[in-house]
Amino acid sequence: MNHENLFTAALMLKEPLYVARIEFEQVKGELHIYVDFRKGAKFTCPICLAKDCSIHDTIDKTWRHLNFFQYKAFIHYRNPRYTCPTHGTHLADAPWGAQGTGFTLLFEAMILQMAKYMAVAQIADMVDEHDSRLWRIIKRHVSEAHAVADYSNMVSVGLDETSSKKGHNYVTLFVDMDESKVTYVTEGKGADTLARFKEELPAHNCNPCQIEQISVDMSPAFRKGCDESFPWASVTYDKFHIIKLMNEAVDQVRRDEQKTNPSLKSTRYLWLKNSQSLGKKDSAKLESLTTSNSKTAKAYQLKLTLQDVYASSSNKVDAMLNLTKWYNWAVRCRLDPVKDFAKTVKKHWSGILNHFDSGLTNAVLEGINSIVQSAKARARGYRNIDNLITMIYLLAGKLTFNFQYHHRLLVEFGQPIL
């Protein structure tokens, strides 16, 4: 078996294609594989599947392939244009990659896999390509995969914003809470993001009216968007966001009181952490502080009682009774930050109680957000929002990448199907 036959077999080429010659440029570190077709070969029209289409002329094309050992490998093809009696003259598809991409399917699949774990700039250095070319590969496949994603079974949605870079630049993520996957990402964090999400749903076989539950924080913009775009959906306000706001109220009480009570200085995290997370020394100190007759200790007890509402309530009715008792205590506690928070709870009363029916929290979103933040840290930020959105879909969209858009050719010419 000579070199040409060896590479013909390695590339799994079938008649009428074959490797005509191999050239190795040692100085450049490049392997060039020249593929041709037999004289008199006929081609099949991919539009109407008419066979035995005659060749009109040829155009020289080149694709970057997977490395041959440590060397760059390129496939050169005298790409024929055939004449179909019905559809006229067309460029024949190549079995190893789409026209105009400059890369084979296997190379593109490798880039997508690497992009899940590495910054694109690092990948570009490894494969010796400009990162903008690699971004085009990633964006094209992510865009194609997301365009055909089916969300026909989605009924529960969670949404949250994350920063795209320093400053007031955000993207909003919409997540299928049952499947724990990102279904839509858009720039901004206003009420219009929900309107755009609603417009996107029909393209993915999802009727907006089938969205029954929405989990969200108490952002006024998100609340407005839910009322305007999904007025029929039951809105659940995330319990973690509520406890976070309660923690902020406790900390504000501590800040105000420590001006006259020095023992409260440098104790911020004692009040914010769960007691189970504290060491023995910190636990003993917290216990000593909570037994004192301080405003901060009182606010802390209100926080623990609110947490207990979530932990001990068995149903929505039980939760309503427990939350009412907590609210009556909170609005009379003479601690202004806590009283302000209690008024916020009253304003969002039904959405808070909906948690005990839906069971929804933004824990799934927080997990996805941590993935996004890790990707941003690897890349040291993204030069534009489109790159960030593409990466979110790649990492958290659970997309199905279909490398079979040349399915007939992959089978006909023997290329492996990914």
Image (cartoon, helix red, strand yellow):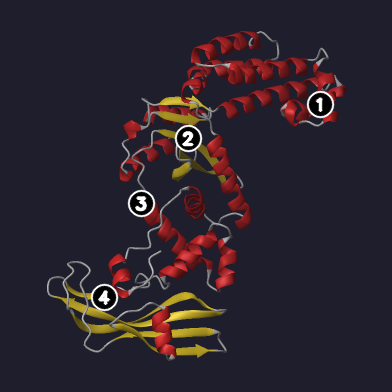
Q: Give how far apart the Cα atoms at labels 2 and 4 are.
A: 46 Å
Q: Give how far apart the Cα atoms at labels 2 and 3 are.
A: 20 Å
Q: Give how far apart the Cα atoms at labels 4 and 1 are.
A: 74 Å
Tell me which amino acid carries mark 1.
Ser
Q: Earlier in the sequence, mark 4 or mark 3?
A: 4
- Residue 187: x percent and y percent? 47, 45
Question: Between residues 203 and 162, which one lies in front from this camera angle?
Answer: 203
- Residue 264: x percent and y percent? 83, 24
**Mark 4 neighbour class, 10 Å CA radius: few under 14, some 14 to 19, many 20 or more:** some
Q: Earlier in the sequence, mark 2 or mark 1?
A: 2
| Pointer 4 residue | 91
Query: In the shown orientation, is residue 267 left or right of residue 172?
Result: right
| Camera-nearest label, 2 or 1 | 1
Q: For the point 42% across and 72% down, which residue is it?
A: 104
Res. 283 mark: 1
Disc 4 secondary structure class: strand
Disc 1 secondary structure class: helix
